[in-house]
Amino acid sequence: MNHDLRAAFLDSMASNSTSVHVVTTGAGNERFGVTVSACSSVCADPPTLLVCINTRSPANAAVAANGVFAVNLLNVAQRGIADTFAGRSASARPFDFSCCTVTAGALDVPLIDGAVAAIECRLVAQQTIGTHTVFFGEVAAIKRAPAAHMPLLYCKRDYGQFLAF
């Protein structure tokens, strides 16, 4: 691949503001989580979303094997959780659930307490493209925080929050 094109693509995508999500799966001592920026609704009938996970991440194989996952939309106070599950925390072990409190959801997947929303999904399709797998999940349950919780955003390789004007 053309390295200049790759760098321009990455810089362009870094300008895209996105909410910060941690995808979780598993139960007990076999829990996996990873921070993702590529998450989107697909349709409302039936409620379906997609997430993209790097094929090198242990969470990728875990989501495929378990067939269920949760998308935790982090709030502005959960930057440390985002960094931990991105593998770049200075104060916690990478990908370690000790950085947060979780509750088992209806599908027995870990839901991060305090998240703006925790959306539980059953895996309905997956497609590997390049370095990532796109997982499509049909929504089975949603746990929402009070409306006062604001989502954590990521843009230009830094965290921020929404400001209405």
Image (cartoon, rainbow, N blue to C red):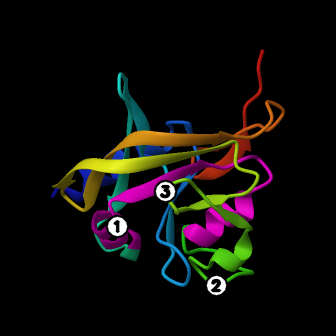
Q: Position of residue 74 (x, y in %)?
A: 67, 49
Q: Position of residue 127 (x, y in %)?
A: 18, 51
Q: Is there a contact, CB below 8 Å, between mark 3 and mark 1?
A: no
Q: Which of the image's four quarters has the C terminus?
A: top right
**Residue in the foreground of this view, choosing between 115 and 90:** 115
* Type of the residue with mark 2: Arg
Find out whether residue 61 is within the magenta segment.
yes
Q: Secondary structure at mark 3?
A: loop
Q: Position of residue 156 (x, y in %)?
A: 57, 45
Q: Position of residue 109 (x, y in %)?
A: 52, 62
Write down the residue under mark 3: 107
Which span is picked out in magenta?
59-85
**Other-residue count near label 2 (Cα within 10 Å), few / some / many at <14 / 14–19 / ≥20:** some
Q: Residue at x 68, y 65 (%)?
A: 102
Write down the residue under mark 2: 93
In the displayed orientation, state which residue is furthest to the right: 148
Compared to residue 143, the image places residue 123 above or below, namely below
Total numbered labels: 3
Write down the residue under mark 1: 66
